Each structure stands twice: as C-alpha cells, then as structure tokens.
Image (cartoon, helix red, strand yellow):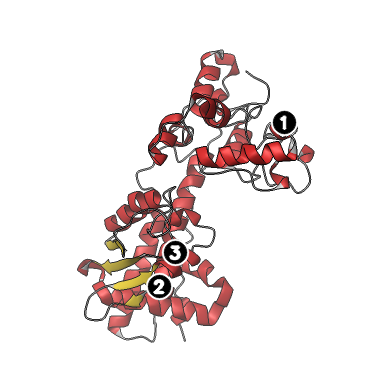
C-alpha cells in the first residue's frame, strides 16, 4: 500500500489539504492552487490549521490547533475500533457506508454535480486524491486472509425517549395532539430508515446524524414556522430555516433535503413542500447556489400533517410544545425535545 493513505482510502500524499502538498509550494503558489481546488471540487483549504498530516499519524503527533484530521471522523474511528489499517482491511469491506460515501468526489460525480467536463490535469491534481473506493479495492485485492481484521460491531441504538406523562392538566384535545407529537418524535428516533450495516460504527453514526437532522428540522418548524391562515399548513421562510440549522448543516443541501428529509417525513405523515419564489434556479437570483446548496432567500417551505396524525391541530401542538420548552429550559430546550420529554406540561 502507498505510504500515508488515509483509513478511508484518500491519498494523503497528493491531497490539497495535506501538509506534504503545502510544504512544496510558496504561499502565493498554494493560494493559486486552492483557487483551482475550489473551482473543481467546490471546496478548498481555508486556513493555516488545515495542513493535515493524515489520519494514520497518531493523534498525539498532530500539530496543535489543527482542524484536520477530524477527531470525530466516523470512518477514522470505525477503523480504529476494529484495529485495521484501512477500511480495505476490514472483514465487512465494502460495507454500505463505504459503498455510499467513498466516491463522493469521484470524477463522475463531480462532473454530474457541476455539469461540466473535468480536464485530465484537474482530475489528477484535485480529484484523484479522493477516489477512495477504487484505491481501497486495489488494496483489498492484494490482502491475504490473515491480513483481514474482523469488524468491531456496535450494539443497537438505545432509545432515549421519555414516556408520555400521565395526569396532565390539559384538555382532552390538547393531550391527544401532544401525544401525536410524542409519537412522531418516537417514530423518528426508532427508525432505521431501511439502512443496512448499522452495527458498523461509521454507518450507525450516519444513522444517528440522519435522525438528528430530522429532529432539528421539526424543531425549526415548531419554533419558526407560522400558520398559513385559511389552510391546514404552516410556512417558514428560507432565511429562518437556513439560519437555525445549527450543526445539522446538511439541511441546507438541496439533494439531501429533497431525497432524504422530504421523503422520510412523508413516510411519517408529514408533508413538506419546498416552494421556489423565483423562476431562476441557480445563481445570485436563484434559490440554489451553483453547488446545489439552498440559499437563505427566494424560496420557502410549506408543512402540513396528514389527518391521521391530527393535521393542523398537531402542528399547533408542536409549536406549543417548543414554546413551553424554550420558556422553561432556554438553550437546553433542544435536548429535551429530542427525547420527546413532555413533563414540562406537568403542573
């Protein structure tokens, strides 16, 4: 295996974020190089603490203040738990996580994303370092059975949902709609969304992240959406939505939003309708950036619940719940929300 290949299969010797690349260039040369990186990948190193030494280097040897390698990288931690050198050395290789994620920056995907052909020079300079899947497959094909390490699996996720409290001093209708909200939060937390290999650490972390994104979306709706008078729906403007994503940044990715958030909520009885407010799709006047991110303007979201889960009355209950949590717990409110803890309604 080439020296200093990351646990995920990235080639650290030619990665734009690597210290080995930065050390071969002057400050001016590297700044120009980053411009090309941004044009090709849509991303580029942005600061002095992104001179990555590679995740194969022990953590205690990482430069102080370095932002990468990422300490919480799920692939790095997954491989570390198993005790393997790379994903290719794992008995579960290729797991679903690697199948889905290892070629995100492949030439095919980059060209499709930006709808333009990548030159051979740009491919070799900026994309080749991240064609992880092919690199891992080559490594795996050369391993002997003795070099394969049995995957270290993780137990199923434990539900942290708090049981719906008894004897609330609320009206019968209010209790019914609050129970609908509680049930929705419970179903979101318990769902695996059809994901496989969730006994593998990296994939389970991905599942946790997806659950968290759905929870954050519902929290944003409960706090910032307003009733669309005369209808059974709520509306939220793009600025309020984008501004309040917190660490769940993927909510601002159009593909993730449409293909996961919208679809999964529909399965739960929540109808989400993104509404563009301009005929221009991408660019400064559009509702998407050139890279497919949702802008904080020129669109809005309509939200409604199906009649089976209480329709607009349950939406009202969601807002009431979020407001009560904010009043009682302030900055800690979201922590109670993800547990569907409704003891805040007990007198």
User: What's the residue at 26%, 68% (across, down)?
Assistant: 309
Place of residue 321 in the rendered image (x, y in percent of width and height, measured from the top left): 42, 77
Q: Kindly state the secondary structure of the residue where label 1 is placed.
A: helix
Determine if residue 101 is in view.
yes
Which of the pair 327/48 is nearer the observer?
Answer: 48
Q: As displayed, is residue 154 above or below residue 24?
A: below
Q: Which mark is residue 11?
A: none
Place of residue 108 in the rendered image (x, y in percent of width and height, measured from the top left): 41, 30
Q: As displayed, is residue 60 above or below residue 311?
A: above
Q: Kindly state the secondary structure of the residue where label 2 is placed.
A: helix
The quadrant in which residue 61 appears is top right
Q: Nearer the viewer, mark 2 or mark 1?
A: 1
| Quadrant holding the N terminus | top right
- Using the numbered discs, state the Cα–Cα distance from disc 3 to disc 2 in whole angstroms: 19 Å
- Left or right: 44, with 326 as reference point: right
Residue denoted by label 1:
20
Residue denoted by label 2:
222
Place of residue 67 in the rendered image (x, y in percent of width and height, measured from the top left): 68, 47
- Using the numbered discs, state the Cα–Cα distance from disc 2 to disc 1 in whole angstroms: 48 Å
Q: Which mark is residue 296?
A: 3
- Left or right: 30, with 321 as reference point: right
Which of the pair 236/297 is nearer the observer?
Answer: 297
Which of the pair 346/284 is nearer the observer?
Answer: 284
């Amino acid at each position: 295996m080439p020296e200093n290949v990351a646990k995920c299969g990235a080639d650290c010797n030619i990665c734009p974020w690597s210290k080995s690349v930065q050390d071969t260039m002057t400050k001016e040369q590297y700044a120009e190089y980053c411009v090309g990186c941004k044009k090709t990948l849509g991303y580029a190193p942005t600061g002095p603490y992104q001179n990555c030494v590679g995740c194969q280097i022990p953590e205690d040897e990482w430069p102080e203040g370095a932002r990468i390698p990422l300490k919480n990288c799920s692939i790095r931690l997954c491989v570390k738990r198993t005790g393997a050198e790379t994903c290719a050395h794992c008995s579960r290789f290729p797991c679903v996580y690697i199948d889905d994620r290892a070629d995100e920056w492949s030439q095919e995907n980059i060209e499709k994303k930006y709808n333009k052909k990548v030159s051979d020079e740009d491919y070799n300079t900026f994309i080749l370092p991240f064609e992880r899947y092919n690199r891992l497959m080559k490594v795996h094909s050369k391993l002997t059975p003795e070099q394969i390490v049995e995957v270290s699996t993780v137990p199923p996720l434990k539900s942290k949902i708090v049981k719906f409290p008894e004897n609330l001093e609320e009206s019968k209708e209010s209790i019914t709609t609050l129970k609908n909200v509680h049930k929705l939060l419970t179903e979101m937390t318990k769902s695996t969304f059809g994901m496989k290999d969730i006994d593998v650490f990296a994939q389970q972390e991905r599942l946790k992240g997806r659950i968290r994104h759905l929870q954050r979306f519902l929290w944003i709706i409960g706090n910032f959406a307003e009733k669309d008078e005369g209808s059974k729906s709520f509306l939220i403007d793009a600025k309020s939505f984008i501004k309040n994503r917190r660490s769940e940044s993927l909510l601002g990715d159009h593909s993730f939003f449409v293909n996961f958030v919208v679809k999964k909520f529909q399965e739960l009885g929540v109808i989400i309708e993104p509404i563009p407010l301009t005929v221009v799709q991408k660019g400064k006047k559009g509702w998407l950036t050139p890279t497919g991110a949702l802008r904080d303007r020129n669109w809005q979201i309509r939200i409604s619940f199906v009649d089976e889960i209480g329709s607009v009355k349950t939406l009202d209950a969601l807002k009431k719940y979020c407001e009560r949590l904010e009043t009682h717990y302030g900055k800690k409110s979201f922590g109670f929300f993800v547990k569907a803890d409704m003891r805040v309604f007990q007198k």
